[in-house]
């Protein structure tokens, strides 16, 4: 069911529906009910029959460590959360329905990039391949059939290369947060924003080569992985690696967001989007390794930039996923936008906050249009046992 769409602009990862908002200026979302769309889909009654595989997982490293990668020994862990979101009930951590139920998963060991892919690494890839990212290409109106309800509403001036970024000049006076999709008010489509120009013309990566690359789509990431002899992690591999061998913890360092007042990842302080503080020292991306690594030696698994994983997004996947090395559902389903092909992103970003997103939690999931390019989304790669002997880089 994978679409052949090559659209270089669409929905930013923290907000399904932003495409319609930023491309057409539609106010239609404001009339929708304030409830989370996820609550509209009934949850299945019980997890389906698990696929048994009792052989022990791969724990010993395969080959020697590739540069910049760490070995994640295989094991069994509890994926997701046991907190079931109920309408009207307190949910201080802003947990989403799709994180439930908590379920046991076993993954085999693999190598994982210790950091998000940096601008320097991506630049090397582009230098060797002349690859052009989606955000650098000009879209056609017809590319949005099936994504934007009425493509005639897309202004001609929006059919230009670009990406989604924070709108510093959003309308604070008329800001509302009482309807689904209110977050979109603080975003805009920035013409000519791309990986070399994270926030548009005038911005540059010249002095931030050690920051994560951003404004890359799923296909851009796959192309990089192929060049590097790697692949994107599965969602289960990603969460297993984030948790670092300890079940049940909210964050990859424990249960306190700022233990002893210390900032453990790059996120947004203050109420998003009106109050933008900078207590952790970084308003946008930070150099990789600016914050402590997790127990497996991985940096920025929480915060800095969202990270694409390979799995299609389905809100109900955890009710049906196999126990051993789950690779995601065969197709996607975001009840809020069922027609749009979406995959999962993980870990939150510098835009994630305590009043809405909380994407820096171990269990937090996000879904993104596969063709979205956004200034707070990047990726990292893995190498599994079957790939290890073939990898040169
Ligand atoms: Ca920050
Ligand atoms: Ca990250």
Image (cartoon, rainbow, N blue to C red):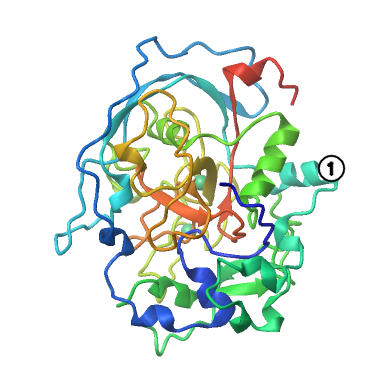
Could you tell me how many numbered marks the image carries?
1
Toward the left, the furthest residue is 89
Q: Which of 194 and 134 is in front in this view?
A: 134
Percent coordinates x, y for residue 340 in the rendering: 51, 59
Q: Name the residue under label 1.
A: 129
Q: What secondary structure is marked by label 1?
A: helix
Q: Which of 163 and 212 is in front in this view?
A: 163
Which of the 4 image quadrants contains residue 100? top left
* Residue occupying the point 71% across, 40% down: 224
* Residue occupying the point 58% across, 53% down: 370
Percent coordinates x, y for residue 60 in the rendering: 50, 10
Percent coordinates x, y for residue 126 in the rendering: 80, 46
Which of the 4 image quadrants contains residue 369? bottom right
Toward the bottom, the furthest residue is 173
Mark 1 lies within 8 Å of ligand 2 (Cβ measured): no
Q: Quadrant of the C terminus?
A: top right
Q: In this view, does 58 lie above or below 171?
A: above
User: Could you tell whether 168 is left or right of 240 in the image?
Assistant: right
* Residue occupying the point 68% across, 14% down: 389
Q: Is residue 258 above or below residue 108?
A: below
Which of the 4 image quadrants contains residue 191? bottom right
Question: Badge 1: few (under 14), some or many (20 or more) residues near its Cα, within 10 Å?
Answer: few
């Amino acid at each position: 069911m994978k679409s052949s769409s090559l659209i270089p602009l669409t929905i930013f990862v923290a907000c399904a529906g932003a495409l319609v908002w930023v491309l057409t200026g539609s106010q239609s979302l404001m009339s929708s009910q304030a409830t989370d769309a996820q609550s509209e889909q009934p949850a299945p009654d019980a997890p389906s029959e698990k696929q048994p595989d009792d052989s022990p997982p791969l724990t010993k490293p395969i080959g020697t460590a590739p540069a910049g990668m760490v070995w994640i020994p295989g094991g069994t862990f509890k994926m997701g959360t046991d907190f079931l979101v109920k309408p009207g009930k307190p949910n201080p951590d802003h947990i989403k329905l799709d994180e439930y139920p908590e379920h046991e998963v076993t993954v085999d060991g693999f190598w994982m990039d210790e950091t998000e892919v940096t601008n320097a690494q991506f630049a090397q890839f582009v230098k060797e391949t002349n690859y052009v990212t989606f955000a650098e290409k000009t879209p056609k109106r017809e590319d949005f059939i099936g994504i934007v309800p009425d493509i005639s509403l897309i202004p001609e001036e929006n059919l230009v290369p670009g990406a989604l970024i924070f709108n510093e000049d959003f309308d604070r006076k008329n800001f509302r947060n009482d309807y689904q999709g209110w977050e979109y008010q603080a975003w805009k489509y920035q013409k000519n924003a791309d990986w070399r120009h994270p926030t548009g013309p005038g911005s540059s990566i010249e002095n931030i080569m050690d920051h994560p690359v951003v404004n890359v789509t799923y296909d851009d990431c796959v192309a990089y992985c192929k060049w590097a002899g790697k692949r994107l992690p599965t969602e289960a591999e990603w969460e297993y690696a984030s948790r670092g061998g300890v079940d049940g913890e909210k964050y990859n360092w424990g249960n306190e967001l700022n233990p002893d007042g210390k900032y453990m990842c790059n996120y947004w302080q203050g109420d998003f989007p009106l109050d933008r503080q900078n207590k952790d020292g970084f308003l946008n991306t930070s150099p990789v390794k600016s914050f402590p690594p997790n127990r497996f030696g991985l940096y920025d698994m929480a915060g800095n930039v969202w990270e694409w994983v390979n799995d299609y997004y389905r809100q109900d996947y955890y009710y049906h996923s196999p126990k051993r090395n789950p690779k995601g559902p065969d197709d996607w389903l975001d009840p809020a936008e069922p027609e749009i092909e979406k995959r999962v992103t993980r870990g939150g970003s510098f835009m994630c906050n305590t009043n809405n997103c909380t994407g820096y939690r171990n269990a937090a999931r996000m879904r993104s249009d596969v063709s979205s390019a956004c200034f707070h989304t990047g990726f990292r790669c893995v190498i599994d046992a079957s790939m290890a002997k073939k990898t040169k880089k």
